[in-house]
Amino acid sequence: MPLDNILVLAAAAATEAEGGNVASEIFNTFKIYPVTFFCQLLNFLIVCAVLKKFAYGPVREMLDARKKRIADGEAKLAEIEKQIAESEQRTQEAVQEANERAKRLIEEAKESAVILSEKKTQEASAEAKGIIAKAEEAARGEKDKMHADLKREFGRLVANTTAQVTGKVLNDDDQQRINEEAMAEVES
């Protein structure tokens, strides 16, 4: 190839020395026709313009849009991760607060149960002492009757106290069992 270029330049120099047109000599050597060259150049420019408008332009726009969507997606992902972290922290705080409140309520319930139990025990004890004092003052003939009444009353008090302390409504079977146990204790 370099030899061909040297030959073309030498031919151009010889043509110029002879007084001819160098450009027309080059066109003749390479078989370039000005009208055909101009049409091919125009076709090339038209193809470039069409490709730029209909191929490169839309592809570039699509790539830019995709790049923007990816950047937006990453920003949204970072925001979502931040919100998840904040939500987890708020949830953890709420669970901790609920646990503390539950512990406090349990302690208060225990204290209330102890106080109520003591109060009911004292009330039951005082009432039992009063009934016993009345029974001792009664005549010997009514002792058996009073003793039976005392058993029933004591069983009822135990059942009521048990129901109030446990917070459970006692059915007939539970009351009967408690009455029997109370009577057994009173008799012994």
Image (cartoon, grey):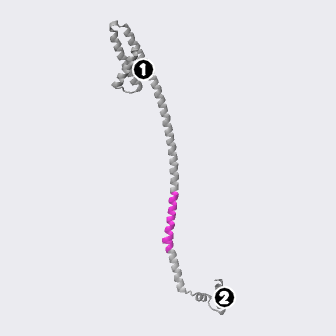
Q: Amino acid at mark 2?
A: Ala
Q: Residues within 10 Å of mark 1 (few under 14, many from 20)?
A: some
- Amino acid of disc 1: Lys
Q: Position of residue 7 (x, y in %)?
A: 65, 87
Between discs 2 and 1, the one toward the N terminus: 2
Q: Is residue 58 visible?
A: yes
Q: What residue is shown with label 1?
A: 120
Q: Is 100 placed above or below 184 here?
A: below
Residue 188 in the figure: left or right of residue 63 = left
**Residue at 38 percent of width and 21 percent of height:** 178
Indicate the position of residue 60 as horizontal and vertical percent values. Answer: 51, 67
Where disc 2 sits, the SS reads helix
- Position of residue 22 in the picture relative to residue 177 (left or right): right
Q: Nearer the viewer, residue 68 or 2?
A: 2
Mark 2 surroundings within 10 Å by alpha-carbon count, few (fewer than 14), some (14 through 19), many (20 or more): few
Query: Pointer 2: what residue?
Result: 10
- Quarter of the rendering occupied by the N terminus: bottom right
Q: In the rendered image, which quarter contains the C terminus?
A: top left
Label 1 secondary element: helix
Q: Main secondary structure of the magenta part?
A: helix
- Residue 78 lies, in percent from the top left, at 53, 52
Q: Does residue 185 lie above or below 28 as drawn? A: above
Start-end of magenta stretch: 50-72
Residue at (33% x, 9% y) in the render: 142
Residue 127 in view here: no
Dot label at residue 23: none
**Looking at the picture, how far across and down is residue 140, in whole percent?**
34, 6
Q: CA distance from mark 2 to mark 1?
A: 131 Å
- Front position in the image: 153 or 19: 153
